[in-house]
Image (cartoon, grey):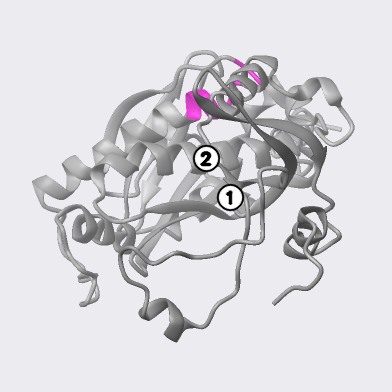
Amino acid sequence: MDTKSENRSAGAAAERLLDNPGLTVERLPMLTVIFDRLAASCAEGLRPFSPAILSCFVNSITTDHVWDALDAYDGSVAAILYSPELDGRVLVGLDRRCLFSLMEVMLGGDAQEAPHTDDRNYSTLEVRVAQTVFEIAAEALNSAFGPVIATTFRLERVETRMDFTVMGRRNVLAVIAKILIQSMDIGGQMFVVIPQPALTPIRQQLSRDLSSDGSASDPRWQKLMHRGVQKAEIAAIGILDEKTVMLGEISQWRVGDILPVNASALSKVRLDCKNQPLFWCDLGQSRGHYTLKVSDRVDVDEMPLAQFLALAGATEAK
């Protein structure tokens, strides 16, 4: 074999190694976790800017060559984010419909008319709004990659033309996540393009399966969640008696009317929370205040009112 043939063979082998077809989302389950966290963080970060309810959710996660993915989003506005920890660049973009929908919502529109999608240059205000979204996305990516690696994504620049030679060779594989941003039945798509070279150093961490790895959860997050749940304020209501009456009878009630109840001082009090019966309690007094002493759990398989009437000593439910 001559020298030229050997060089061609070596070059072809290098191309096959660099364009590894093994980059699949199924083999990297942590990518799904990362993009789900990214969507949730973006929704939280955009909420202060939108007077209407805004939602973000992952539509799809696929793989494709970088430049093929960029060609599909021609006319969009995008940002280049750099991560020194991954030693790679990530592209985050908004299609025209998404950006115009965000402008409509953020400026107080009622979405009665479809947002403009005409092919024109972006205004300075629209580019600034897009940059704000990209800054939120950069912070969201820092948080989303937390379970895998501590990263710092820095916004390098915002582009309105999809000519991103900085993303590498045309045939480099990349993971493309499509995230839908919606508010008031209008919205569009945010897309995230992560080239394979940026994921290669953490490929092993990305291949973890959380369903079989109990240690993959974030202990700090679990502790914060546990504390947050314990500090949640809820209303507990004690019910001494319930009575079924006609709506017409209620409409005739006046101030001073006396309503008879089928209960006494010895009757059980049912403790409810969010319309869910929890406990039966004994009514008492202590230091001038009424008290409830928990005596038993409510049997949720029985009708709460029927059980109450039985414990209260009623012989017939009217």
Q: Which of 73 and 36 is in front in this view?
A: 36
Q: Give the range drawn in magenta.
A: 141-149
Q: Mark 2 points at which residue?
A: 235
Residue 111, percent from left and from top: 24, 71
Q: Are marks 2 and 1 in contact (CB under 8 Å)?
A: yes
The mark found on residue 274 in the picture is 1
Name the amino acid, label 2.
Ala
- Relative to 200, 58 lies left or right: left
Residue 25 seen in render: yes
**Crowding at mark 2 (Cα within 10 Å: few <14, some 14-19, many 20+):** few
Name the amino acid, label 1.
Lys
Q: Measuring 60% from the left and 68% from the top, which residue is drawn there? A: 243
Give the vertical position of 180 relative to 78 (above or below). Answer: below
What is the number of callouts on the image?
Answer: 2
- Relative to 63, 58 lies left or right: left
Give the vertical position of 243 relative to 123 (above or below). Answer: below
